[in-house]
Amino acid sequence: MDSLDALRIPEEKKRYIIDQLNPILEEMVAECIKKMPDDPVPFMLDWLEKRKVLEEEKLLSPKEKELMLKENEDLKESIRKNQHTFQDAAKLVAFETEDTKETSDTESDESGSDEMSELPEEFKKPAKELGKCRQSVSAEAFGEWNKKKSFIPPIVTKSDEQKDRLRNCLLKSFLFSNLEDQDLAIVIGAMKEVPVEPQQCVIEQGESGENLYVTESGKLDCIITTSSGSPKVVRTCEPGDVFGELALLYNCPRAATVKSQEKCVLWELDRATFTHIVKESAEKKRARYDIFLSKVSLLQSMDAYERSQLADSLRSEAFSDGMVIVNVGDVGTKFYIIEEGAAVATKNGEVVMMYDVGDYFGELALIRNQPRAATVTARGFTKVLSLDSRSFKRLLNVNELLKRSNQYT
């Protein structure tokens, strides 16, 4: 309340923040810190959506709940029965083999290399302690009382060799791999190389944080002090891993001490550049893709929230004229939407389908169990938005896809 007293806002708004917003934000941030997702934005959106559903379910009568469960089971049964009856769609997209457990595990290792496992019990603060520090666990907010200033990114002089090393390092990290080229260039320009000696403490648990670090070489231990006062290693950072980002995301104290095992090379990024470039990049990406995605026929039934989740998972890929996007016989792992340019599908040397802006292909390949049945090639310079198979199945309506494919049988 003391911090709110300093704000020049009406008492009713202060009361609204205390009574309505704080309970939700504290619960959400606590859950996010507990799970420590690679990308907190979609995690928090998903958490809010689930919370909304739970609140709505409380208003349903037992009979209404029973009816909804029955409809859901009927829908699953319909998908199961129809899944084996569909034939090649007119789009003649290729089929792919369903991800095996081994492939799934490999993908998980690759995409989640930066994930911290769930924090141990010793690291979870008791409720009374959380209450004492809740004001420091909050995302940066801007408004009338906290003006957002124009941002001029710092530029740290680097050799071409350093830039190449840093770029390769950042592309291994979940936090930076989806940045647009111009944003990645700004981040590379702003980062500072930090050599670290063995057994050197880079950050200390409980301190305030103004920088995050990306590991280029060497290994570092993330250590917490348990309730008994003894140190405990909860994670080891290796090349490509990021640490120190939580303090910047939530304005909270450092969650752990990070100490090097050996000689390391780190790259340091300041808070201002992280906030203005990395965090805002996700927001810009959503805004840019929202209108475009709403015009794609397959996605027109999605609401703004669902499109924002989809936008977070999309990756932009560019192909020059004649480059193969998917190859006949290959196992497919992605769904594609033409963002710019055009593409052509061929089979046995014959053109079987043309794709223009807004057209999509690969949807059946992520549902059925067959390899690619056609080759898709770029016509002129072409940009596509790609979605990996796991995100595809999580974000898109599989039942709707099956209905659409049935129209062509």
Image (tube, rainbow, N blue to C red):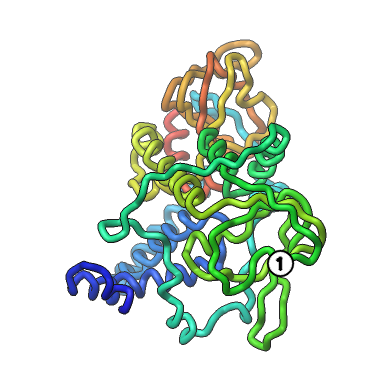
Classify residue 213 by image quadrant.
bottom right
The foreground one among 334 and 305 is 305
The foreground one among 187 and 378 is 187
Residue 270 position, x and y percent, is 54, 53
Count of number-bearing discs: 1
Q: Amino acid at mark 1?
A: Cys
Residue 248 position, x and y percent, is 51, 60
The foreground one among 66 and 300 is 300
Direction top: furthest residue: 350
Q: Which residue is mark 1?
A: 201
| Residue at image point 39% right, 48% down | 306
| Residue at image point 26% right, 75% down | 5
Image quadrant occupied by the N terminus: bottom left
Secondary structure, mark 1, is: strand
Q: Is residue 1 left or right of residue 351?
A: left
| Residue at image point 72% right, 76% down | 232
Residue 85 visible in image: no
> Where 395 sits versus 225, above or below?
above
Residue 318 position, x and y percent, is 56, 26
> Where 337 sits versus 205, above or below?
above
Residue 55 position, x and y percent, is 33, 70
Residue 209 visible in image: yes
Classify residue 388 by image quadrant.
top right
Mark 1 residue crowding within 10 angstroms, few (<14) / some (14–19) / many (20+): some
| Residue at image point 47% right, 48% down | 395
